[in-house]
Amino acid sequence: MKLPEAGDYIDIHTHGATVLPGIFSVETLMAHEEKLPGNYPGIIYSFGIHPWFLEENNHDRLLSRVVDMVDNPLIVAIGEAGFDKIKGPSSELQRKTFEEQVNIAEKHRKPVVIHCVRAWEELLQEHKKLSPDMPWLVHGFRGKPELAMQLISRGMYLSFWFDYVLRPESSKLIRSLPADRIFLETDGSGVDIRDIYNKVSNDLGFELEIFKGQILRNFNIFFNNGR
């Protein structure tokens, strides 16, 4: 399995990744789908139960798929798992399934990729309750700096929502955060990860290659915790 190298652009959360020179992708596979990880250069995977596709009548089957897939060496993280107050099943089923996935991640020493919509209190409570050893990454973040620092203070990493991060108003949030706790993503949107890198590196006042090096260090720390 090829890991990112110096100079690579790292897309920490995407769907439908393709092999592109100089771009390293973490593709999210969801347990309700039939897609399996493939051994392609520059692509590794997370695997989990997305709350949008969770139901009482498919919970056991989806959880069994996570258990079956977790030992695959191409699966480097569990998720996206989490909470959604707009779309998804009961909060109790979401909580139960989230805790089950975190327990799988802890047992197999893999980090967790988080989906969270309007459920930040629940997420913070779960982190305090479960006290995980493995790091969590909140993907698609576009909240306020105060919330971001709450999550970071619990040891979490943040990846910005691809559309929000390209807007001028995201600059205040980006500048308020420690660079060693952030990642960038496309979420399968078709946005070019290189454009996102250029915007964020300018916001932070970093030369592009220095910023690439920072994200690579973040990647190695985040995933080395799982080895």
Image (tube, grey):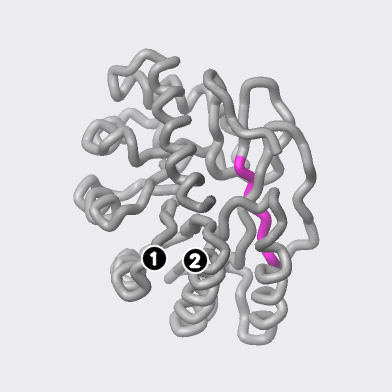
Residue drawn at 28 percent across, 18 percent down = 205
Between the residue at mark 2 and the residue at mark 1, the CA separation in whole angstroms equals 7 Å
Residue type indicated by callout 1: Pro
Q: Is residue 163 visible?
A: no
The residue stretch that appears in magenta: 26-31
Q: Secondary structure at mark 1?
A: loop
List x then y, in percent, for residue 117: 41, 62
Horizontal relation, residue 120 to residue 166: left or right = left
Q: Residue furthest front?
A: 227
Q: Residues within 10 Å of mark 2 (few under 14, many from 20)?
A: some
Mark 2 and mark 1 residues within 8 Å of each other at the beta carbon: yes
**Residue 106, label in figure:** 2
Horizontal relation, residue 152 to residue 53: left or right = left
Q: Is residue 155 visible?
A: yes
Q: Quadrant of the N terminus?
A: top right
In the image, 99 versus 174, the foreground residue is 99
Residue drawn at 33 percent across, 36 percent down = 180
Q: Residues within 10 Å of mark 1 (few under 14, many from 20)?
A: some
Name the chief secondary structure element in magenta: strand
List x then y, in percent, for residue 200: 38, 26
**Residue 102, label in figure:** none
Residue drawn at 33 percent across, 18 percent down = 206
Residue 71: image quadrant is bottom right
Q: Is residue 32 above or below residue 203?
A: below
List x then y, in percent, for residue 39: 78, 42
List x then y, in percent, for residue 209: 44, 15
Q: Earlier in the sequence, mark 2 or mark 1?
A: 2
Residue drawn at 61 percent across, 63 percent down = 48
Residue type indicated by callout 2: Glu
**Residue 132, label in figure:** 1
Q: Residue 30 magenta-drawn?
A: yes
